[in-house]
Image: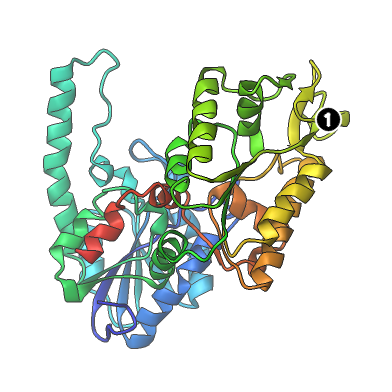
Amino acid sequence: MTIDKFNFSGKKAFVRVDFNVPLDENFHITDDTRMRAALPTLKKILADGGSIIIGSHLGRPKGLNEKFSLKHIKGHLEELLGTEVQFASDCASEEAAVKASALQPGEVLLLENLRFYAEEEGKPRGLADDATDEEKAAAKKAVKESQKEFTKKLASYADCYVNDAFGTAHRAHASTALIAQYFDADHKMFGYLMEKEVKAVDRILNDIHRPFTAIMGGSKVSSKIDIIENLLNKVDNLIIAGGMTYTFVKAMGGRIGDSLCENDKLDLALDLMKKAKEKGVNLVLGIDTKAADAFSNDAHTQYCLDPEIPDGWQGLDIGPKTEELFASVIKQSKTILWNGPTGVFEFENFTHGSRAVGEAIVEATKNGAYSLVGGGDSVACVNKFGLADGVSYVSTGGGALLEAIEGKVLPGIAAIQE
């Protein structure tokens, strides 16, 4: 079932959203992107004459924790929806069940943080550090058994289930995957955001217009191995950027000064380069670096040709020659995936490379390329530089997007499609 074809009139919908938004020390939301992204789904249900039970997590609490209460976002949610939002202070309590049962068309109930319960993730908590394997196994079995009752309880609140939380689609949690089994195929569906995310991933992996270029940034090669290996079977160009660059440079015998490097991954870097060559993939590394004498926005800087960064200096962004090189590859592309900045874009003096890559992607998109930007830092980049409207799609999923690119089946998606 698709959300457009479903009539929510008189129906109660359990909607799993991703309202895991950043809060400051006074519990004010500093970025409501994820909340705004769910509005089309929520407003469709209300416009149809349905009522909504909203489930989400916030942070990574290990039990009840005031800091991670969803009551902090209730007021802003009311502003966004333009209607009063009720609140259940315990997502699996009798109070929640009563409030859900009493919901009238057009009304909204926000449940407390689902992760206050270990059953949401299905992982035992509170085990002693010296717990035996038998104790760990018993605790895991116990929480898995109680997880079924927890999931059944959540499902009992509603007539239908809508998953609009792509950011958690890679987790087989109670509210993201297991709950779907309590609804038949005509009463479970993706929300609008999930639909867009699924289509965007499918487009980037299965409807490729060539040349296909992936820009992989980030600090560690080790965290991107599976993604890179999967992409080597699909892309024409693979641009390596960010801190992981220096692992490749050192592996080839270059001088990297004090730059970030995974010394135990040098052979892996060489192996990835070998695989790229065997598969005919153009693996693109930078040719110059903006180096600093300290990890600071106010550090002294100089441009160094790779691979000649002197001792006492560290690469914090790409240099102008690399900007030109990367941009020329990007502008000739017809499918583009960007995951990870080129440098420490949080420091204003080291934003130039990431901005140049973003602007090149925007130009390529104007010329007909399909561009997908995903991963928290890349999304932060395009938002910071005001480029989000110039790319084809900005994904809200971090880990979920990366696992999808790795070629993994995401439980939250499979639960709806099966």
346 relative to 99 in the view: left or right: right
Q: Residue at x 74, y 30 (%)?
A: 315
Residue position marked by numbered label 1 in the rendering: 304
Q: Is residue 358 above or below residue 310?
A: below
Q: Quadrant of residue 62?
A: top left
Q: Is residue 338 left or right of residue 331?
A: left
Relative to residue 205, is residue 313 depicted above or below?
above
Residue at screen point 40% across, 46% down: 406
What number of labels is visible? 1
Q: Secondary structure at mark 1?
A: strand
Tell me the quadrant of the picture where the N terminus can be found.
bottom left
Q: Residue 220: image x %, image y %?
A: 55, 31
Q: Front-most of 389 and 353? A: 353
Expressed as whole percent of the image width and height from the top left, the position of residue 131 reads 22, 16
User: From the image, which quarter does the C terminus lie in?
Assistant: bottom left
Say which quarter of the image contains residue 343. top right
Colouring of the image: rainbow
Query: Is residue 105 visible to us here?
Result: yes
Q: Horizontally, is 155 left or right of 4 in the view?
A: left
Q: Position of residue 321 (x, y in %)?
A: 81, 43
Q: Amino acid at mark 1?
A: Cys
The residue located at (33%, 48%) in the rendering is: 408
Is residue 30 in sight in this rendering?
no
Residue 155: x and y, percent?
18, 62
Placement of 361 over or under 240, stated as above or below: below
Q: Callout 1: 10 Å neighbours few (<14), some, many (20+)?
A: some
Q: Quadrant of residue 10?
A: bottom left
**Front residue of 39 and 172:** 172
Q: Residue at coordinates 26% horizontally, 12% vertically from top-left?
A: 130
Q: For this rendering, which residue is in front, 218 or 306?
A: 306
- Left or right: where 275 falls relative to 194: right
